[in-house]
Every structure is written in structure tokens, then in C-alpha cells.
């Protein structure tokens, strides 16, 4: 089943929020709403979204600060600012602080829906543009065959991989030398949109170390970055 | 919209410094020039008296007397200059303070006006955006009757909101220009209060708006203005309190006074804001709370035009009470 695309809608004006939600839902999106900056930040930390629609004049923490804050830990999620401020300087600030698009109120419904769709598509395209991993990947003495779902370990044994193990390996290898956040792993491999606090990923990494590392206490390939996620290196 | 906005903003930021620089430069120049002329005059005075002293014939019998006279004249001249200089400095000082205050006030006003324009932008654009979005949704989507009804209702709500905003702005202008003429009539405040509360009930059906109104209390005043005042209070009560919270309107008589209270269960007003909530353009909690800062200012103006007073106090449990007291 294809996962419904999900949007976080941050807007404190109730009437605007309700009608926008209705429209997004009619376009087939899953919509989560937040009425202020704090709620928005909580939602982004807890859940995966394909796009954030963000109002600027919010109570407590304003939209620009929310955007800045999100960018500190998530540089990928597309953010569309929806604001009544239409000075060029306001737009510049919004875009500078990490928004991908800036739409002013009042806006055109069709245009907004199109912009949202395009932003999501573009971000998906960029994400899939990473160099694809070959069917057979080797590092050190190890070999992974993604097609037959098998690997040859350091001792030369052939071990069958589960589908999830293969997916996680692929994700880490695709992002070689980069830290992959735990949330992204849970979302991409397990399909969780809401992030549970589980040890699942850790257990998988422990298995990988058992298969591929010479000394699993001092890993060469599979590193865990405390509080953030995991990294694969092959040097 | 305007590509020069960034430039304008920079310009505006710079202007005060230039003005202050010019101010201090002029002031110090004037004081410096004053000191310069004072010293010069004094020097001349001393020199002149010296020449005069030199010219006196020492053999003259009355030369001592003449010398004394010249010295007395010199001293009295010096005293005159000092007195003159002090008066000048005092006048210039007083003028300087007045000008400084005027400049400051002007900048403060410009700043407040700027804030007001920003608030207006938001307050005008949001209802327009909602109205447009609702109408486009009605036009483009096939909705069930319930959804349609909700969209229409919220659109009317937003139109009313725009109307209240326009009325506030218009009245503010008229009151300031002194061109608004109060149309006095006697009307049944009890009946109208119920009517206005009902209007809010239909606009915000999910909100709990209650009334405790003594029947048949009549007042003499401008019905339209009074409606605006009460609308502003009700609007604030709804805006600043939670969805579940009660908004209560009370109208009652005590002795020689008529009271109208609007009571909400919101977070109340911070003590530091309590003095200033009725100031023009003032909004509690700075920019974070939305609004134009006109509502309460106008409400007070209207109440004052009716020879009444408006008070703000804290509700015993939570929230605040805004009370209009009129003489019978």
C-alpha cells in the first residue's frame, strides 16, 4: 500500500487552519495541525512529515524561529511559509532562515496546492538521487548481495539477510560517511511515521557488527552516534 | 511588494541617529558660541576699563573717586554679562529639553505607528485570506451540506471581523479629528446587550457566552458607538480566552450607577500591562498577541464620551473583568 503523504500545518487562526486542513485532506494528504510554535517543534521531533506549512505570526515562538530551529536538526524536510507579511525583506528573512517557499496571504488555493505538490515531489526526487548501491557490495573481507539477500561475513560464512536487514544496510551504505538519524531509519526501513522509543535499530546494528566487524567493541564500519543515529564508513 | 522596502527600512533605521547628531551638534555649537562671546565681551570690558584707568590724570584731586567709579562700572558690566549668559543658557537648556522630548516622542509615535501598520496588515489580510480560501473551496470542491454550512458561517464571521476592524479605524480617525458628532438617544441597554450577545453566539456557536442582565435599564447615548464599545469587549473576551471558557456579560444597576461587565476566564492581564491596556496601539505582551491596539483605546474614548468610566480588574478565579460604569 502506498503511504499517504503527510503535512504538518502550523496555523493559529482556527478558521484558516480548518479550511486548509479540509483542502489538503481532499487532495489526499494526511494532515497534522499545530496551533503554535512549541506544538510544531514537538510534532516535528516526534513524527515524520513530507512537508511543513508554517504561519509566521504565531503566539509564543514565531514561525521564523520555528523554521530556524527545525533546520538545526532536519535540513531535508520542505518548509513552506504562509504569511500575511509581504515585504520583500520579510520574504528574504523567511527564505534565509531555511524556508523553501514563501506564499503570502491572501493566496490562491490552486496555486498553494500546486506549490505544495511540487515541493514534495522535488524533495522526493533529491532524496532518490543518491548514487544507487550496486547489487553486490564489498567492504573489507565482507560481501553483501542485495539481490539474493545474502552476505559473506569476515569468517567467510554465508548468512541469509532478512528483508529489513538488507534495507537498513542499503540505507546506511547509500549514505556512506554520513550520519543517518534514527528517525530516518525508523521511517525508511520500518515505515514508522510516529517514532517509537525502541531498541530495534540498536539490535540490528549489533548483528551487523557480529557479521562484519573484526572487533565488535571497536567497530570500523558501523558506528553509532549517541543521541542521533548511525554511520557507515568504509576506509 | 515594494522592492525598495529593504532600503527604506535601512534608511528609517539610520534617520534617528542623524537627527540626534544634528541636535547635539547644534546645541553644543550654540553653547560654545555663547561662551565665546561671553569671554570676548568680558575681555573687552576689562581692556576698556584699563584704558580708562590709564587716561586718568593722577594729579587730579578726584582721581581716586574716578578710579573707583570705573572699577564699579566694569564690575557691574561683568555682572550684567554673567546674568545675561545665565538667562541665555537657561532658555537654551529649556528649549533643548523640549525639542529633545519632541523628537523622542515623534520617533516613538512613528515606531508605534509602524507596529500598528504591521498589525493592521495582519488583521486585514487574515480575514481576507480566510474569506478567499473559503469561497474558493466552496467553488472548487464538492462538499457535503455540513461542510458547506461551516465554510459559509466562518466566512460571515470573518466579514464581521473585518467590519469591526473598519469601524474601529474609522471611529479612531473621526474621534482624533474631532469630527464625530455624538447622536444622543435613549435606548434600552438591557435589550441591546442581549441582542449583541446573541450576535456573538451565532458567530461563535461553539463558545459559551452567557448573560445576566437586569431588565429595562435605559441609558442616554450614542447607540452605534456603544455597540462598538461592547463589541470590542466581547471580541477581546473571546479572543483572549480558551475554547471551553465562559464569557459572561452582566448588566445591573446600583444606586446611581449603571454597570456593564464583560467577564472572561482567560489568562488575565499582567500587572505591568494593566495601566496601559487602554493606550492607543498598545498591545499586552508585545507583538506576540495579535490585534491593532485600537479596541480598548476606542472603548475608553466612547465610555468617556458618555461621561462614564471603564475599569479593568482581575476575575476572582482567573481571567479579567472589564467594567463600564455610567451615571444614571
Image (spheres, coloured by chain):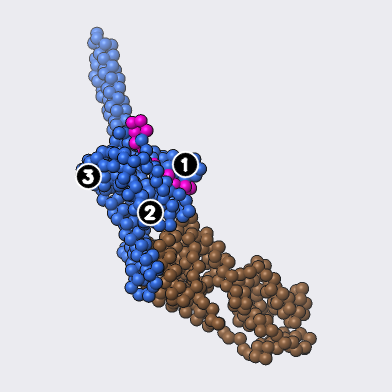
Nearest to the observer: residue B236 or residue B112: B236
Q: Position of residue B307 (x, y in %)?
A: 29, 35
**Quick check: A112 above or below B327?**
below
Q: Where residue B180 is drawn, which disc sits there?
A: 3
Nearest to the observer: residue B224 or residue B294: B224
**Quick check: B304 above or below B161?**
above
Q: Position of residue B184 (x, y in %)?
A: 22, 40
Alpha carbon distance from label 3 to label 2: 30 Å
Residue on which disc 1 sits? B315
The brown chain is: A
What range of the chain is rendered magenta?
A: B254-268
Alpha carbon distance from label 1 to label 2: 22 Å
Callout 1 environment at 10 Å: few (<14), some (14 to 19), or many (20+)?
some
State if disc 2 and disc 3 touch (CB < 8 Å): no
Residue on which disc 2 sits? B201
Identify the mark nearer the N-term, 1 or 3: 3
Identify the element where label 3 is drawn: loop
Chain letter of disc 3 in the image: B
Front label number (3 vs 2):
2
Is B258 inside the magenta-drawn segment?
yes
Q: Residue at x 68, y 74 (%)?
A: A201
Callout 3 environment at 10 Å: few (<14), some (14 to 19), or many (20+)?
few
Q: Position of residue B156 (x, y in %)?
A: 33, 61
Chain B palette colour: blue
Residue A218: tell me if it is visible.
Answer: yes
Identify the element where label 1 is drawn: loop
Q: Where residue A165 is drawn, which disc sits there?
A: none
Q: Residue at x 46, y 41 (%)?
A: B314
| Co-location on one chain, circles 3 and 2 | yes
Q: Residue at x 72, y 79 (%)?
A: A208
Identify the mark nearer the N-term, 3 or 2: 3
Amino acid at each position: 500500500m502506498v503511504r499517504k503523504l503527510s503535512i504538518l500545518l502550523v496555523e493559529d487562526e482556527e478558521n484558516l487552519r480548518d479550511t486548509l486542513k479540509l483542502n489538503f485532506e481532499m487532495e489526499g494528504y494526511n494532515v497534522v495541525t499545530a496551533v503554535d510554535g512549541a506544538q510544531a517543534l514537538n510534532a516535528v521531533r516526534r513524527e515524520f512529515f513530507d512537508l511543513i506549512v508554517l504561519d509566521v505570526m504565531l503566539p509564543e515562538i514565531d514561525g521564523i524561529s520555528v523554521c530556524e530551529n527545525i533546520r538545526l536538526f532536519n535540513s531535508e524536510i520542505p518548509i513552506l511559509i504562509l504569511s500575511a507579511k509581504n515585504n520583500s525583506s520579510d520574504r528574504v528573512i523567511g527564505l534565509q532562515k531555511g524556508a523553501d517557499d514563501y506564499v503570502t496571504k491572501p493566496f490562491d488555493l490552486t496555486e498553494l496546492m500546486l506549490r505544495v505538490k511540487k515541493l514534495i515531489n522535488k524533495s522526493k526526487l533529491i532524496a532518490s538521487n543518491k548514487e544507487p548501491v550496486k547489487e553486490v557490495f564489498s567492504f573489507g573481507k565482507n560481501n553483501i548481495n542485495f539481490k539474493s539477500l545474502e552476505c559473506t561475513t569476515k569468517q567467510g560464512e554465508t548468512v541469509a539477510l532478512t528483508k529489513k536487514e538488507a534495507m537498513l544496510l542499503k540505507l546506511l551504505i547509500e549514505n556512506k560517511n554520513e550520519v543517518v538519524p534514527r528517525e530516518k531509519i525508523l521511517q525508511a526501513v520500518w515505515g514508522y511515521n510516529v517514532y517509537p522509543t525502541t531498541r530495534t535499530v540498536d539490535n540490528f546494528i549489533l548483528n551487523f557488527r557480529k557479521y562484519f566487524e573484526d572487533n565488535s567493541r571497536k567497530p570500523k564500519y558501523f558506528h553509532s552516534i549517541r543521541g542521533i543515529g548511525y554511520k557507515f564508513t568504509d576506509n | 511588494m515594494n522592492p525598495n522596502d529593504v532600503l527604506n527600512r535601512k534608511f528609517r533605521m539610520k534617520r534617528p541617529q542623524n537627527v540626534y547628531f544634528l541636535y547635539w551638534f547644534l546645541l553644543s555649537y550654540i553653547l560654545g558660541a555663547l561662551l565665546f562671546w561671553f569671554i570676548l565681551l568680558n575681555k573687552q570690558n576689562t581692556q576698556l576699563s584699563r584704558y580708562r584707568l590709564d587716561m586718568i590724570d593722577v594729579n587730579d584731586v578726584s582721581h581716586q573717586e574716578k578710579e573707583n567709579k570705573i572699577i564699579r562700572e566694569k564690575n557691574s558690566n561683568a555682572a550684567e554679562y554673567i546674568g545675561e549668559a545665565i538667562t541665555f543658557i537657561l532658555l537654551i537648556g529649556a528649549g533643548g529639553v523640549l525639542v529633545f522630548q519632541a523628537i523622542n516622542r515623534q520617533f516613538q509615535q512613528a515606531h508605534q505607528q509602524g507596529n500598528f501598520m504591521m498589525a493592521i496588515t495582519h488583521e486585514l489580510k487574515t480575514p481576507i485570506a480566510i474569506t478567499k480560501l473559503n469561497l474558493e473551496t466552496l467553488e472548487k470542491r464538492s462538499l457535503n451540506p455540513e461542510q458547506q454550512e461551516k465554510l459559509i458561517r466562518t466566512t460571515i464571521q470573518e466579514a464581521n471581523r473585518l467590519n469591526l476592524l473598519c469601524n474601529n479605524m474609522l471611529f479612531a480617525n473621526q474621534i482624533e479629528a474631532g469630527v464625530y458628532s455624538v447622536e444622543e438617544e435613549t435606548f434600552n441597554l438591557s435589550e441591546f446587550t442581549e441582542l449583541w450577545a446573541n450576535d456573538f453566539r451565532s458567530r461563535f456557536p461553539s463558545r459559551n457566552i452567557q448573560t445576566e442582565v437586569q431588565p429595562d435599564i435605559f441609558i442616554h447615548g450614542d447607540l452605534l458607538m456603544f455597540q462598538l464599545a461592547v463589541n470590542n469587549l466581547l471580541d477581546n473576551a473571546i479572543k483572549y480566552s480558551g475554547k471551553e471558557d465562559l464569557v459572561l456579560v452582566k448588566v445591573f444597576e446600583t444606586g446611581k450607577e449603571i454597570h456593564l461587565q464583560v467577564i472572561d476566564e482567560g489568562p488575565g492581564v499582567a500587572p505591568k500591562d494593566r495601566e496601559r491596556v487602554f493606550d492607543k496601539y498598545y498591545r499586552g505582551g508585545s507583538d506576540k498577541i495579535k490585534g491593532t491596539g485600537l479596541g480598548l483605546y476606542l472603548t475608553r474614548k466612547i465610555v468617556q464620551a458618555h461621561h462614564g468610566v471603564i475599569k479593568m480588574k482581575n476575575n476572582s478565579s482567573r481571567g479579567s473583568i472589564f467594567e463600564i460604569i455610567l451615571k444614571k
